[in-house]
């Protein structure tokens, strides 16, 4: 690749969610660019995925880069370190094979990777194995941490379910204001037999969902199907009964589930949409249509 033929390069950079790397996107790109200049390669593209996991290749800019590679728009992909490019061994091997068929090589700024030779490909797979091992170890440590917290009855993340807050020790504590809304959801669903209708009534009464958002059928379902509301704690493989977490009775949970299951048996028909909610839906759809028309710069309907 160092002959007379011009070599076109694509730079790829990535940071993980909660990035703890010493190298930012800008630093990764700068080092890759300097490397390309030293090799006499012309940088044609820079692809950046910020706050994206390396455990999957389903990253927007990464996929766009692969599409460009298949179009043979560059000769080599340059990245700062292999784990910035990809972490799964299976994905790495498959991607390298696909790129090789397109005539595109891989190059790491900080590791010896040269996929043009047999020895280089062997070294590449060794590094890929190390990257996957590191990912698996990180996952194991994370699962052990979650399990340890769950065994102590503590909630393992910063977002407790609706109806609860976290005390100083990280355990769930009933939030009475939200708990009243949880009880109302269970009662309303058994009466109305419609999750969209329950969500409509909550929004109509200006009762905010978590973080001040609006209620929808999915948010209502998450409340109705969560066993934590009867005190059944099920987190990270730990099953426990915590009476202090109870907000509704077992009977309320059973009734809600029976109401949901009645449609599957074919013994019940869904209730018709109330006129008030039907009107709101028509108004909303009309507003969305008008907005769509404006974006297209077409004449709006009268």
Image (cartoon, rainbow, N blue to C red):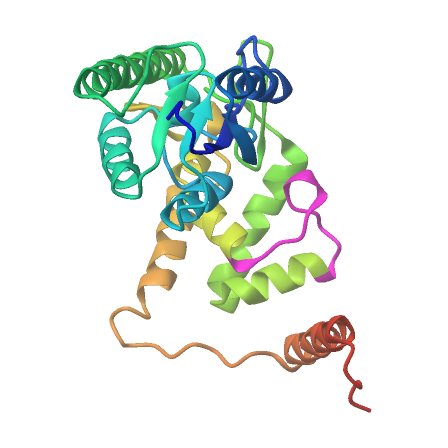
> For residue 147, what is the image quadrant?
top left
Q: Which residue is drawn at 63% across and 38% down?
A: 178
For the C terminus, the quadrant is bottom right
Could you tell me residue 278's position as x and y percent? 64, 79
Count the marks: 0
Could you tell me residue 222's position as x and y percent? 47, 47
Residue 171 or 258: which is nearer the viewer? 171
Horizontal side of 209 relative to 74 (left or right) equals right
Horizontal side of 121 relative to 183 (left or right) equals left
Q: Residue at x 55, y 53 (%)?
A: 185
Asked if residue 176 is among those painted magenta in the image, a careful observer would answer: no
Work out whether residue 294 can be spotted.
Answer: yes
Magenta residues (range): 204-217
Could you tell me residue 229's position as x and y percent? 46, 37
Residue 171 or 49: which is nearer the viewer? 49
Horizontal side of 301 relative to 186 (left or right) equals right
């Amino acid at each position: 690749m160092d002959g007379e033929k011009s070599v076109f390069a694509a730079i790829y950079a990535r940071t993980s969610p909660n990035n703890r790397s010493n190298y930012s996107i800008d630093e990764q790109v700068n080092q890759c660019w300097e490397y390309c200049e030293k090799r006499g390669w012309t940088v044609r593209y820079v692809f950046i995925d910020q706050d994206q996991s390396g455990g999957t290749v389903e990253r927007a800019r990464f996929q766009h880069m692969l599409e460009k590679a298949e179009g043979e728009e560059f000769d080599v992909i340059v990245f700062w370190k292999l784990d910035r490019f990809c972490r799964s061994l299976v994905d790495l091997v498959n991607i390298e094979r696909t790129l090789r068929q397109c005539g595109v090589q891989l190059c790491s700024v900080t590791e010896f990777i040269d996929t043009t030779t047999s020895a280089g490909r062997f070294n590449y797979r060794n590094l890929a194995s190390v990257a996957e091992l590191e990912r698996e170890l990180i996952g194991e440590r994370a699962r052990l941490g979650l399990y340890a917290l769950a065994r102590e009855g503590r909630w393992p993340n910063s977002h407790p379910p609706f109806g609860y807050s976290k005390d100083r020790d990280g355990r769930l504590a009933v939030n009475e204001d939200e708990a009243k809304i949880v009880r109302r959801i269970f009662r309303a669903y058994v009466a109305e037999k419609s999750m969209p209708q329950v969500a409509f009534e909550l929004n109509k009464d200006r009762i905010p969902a978590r973080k001040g958002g609006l209620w929808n059928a999915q948010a209502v379902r998450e409340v109705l199907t969560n066993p934590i509301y009867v005190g059944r704690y099920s987190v990270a493989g730990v099953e426990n009964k915590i009476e202090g977490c109870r907000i509704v009775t077992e009977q309320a949970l059973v009734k809600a589930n029976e109401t949901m299951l009645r449609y599957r048996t074919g013994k019940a028909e869904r209730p018709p949409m109330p006129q008030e909610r039907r009107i709101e839906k028509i108004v909303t759809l009309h507003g969305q249509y008008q907005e769509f028309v404006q974006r297209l710069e077409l004449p709006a309907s009268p």
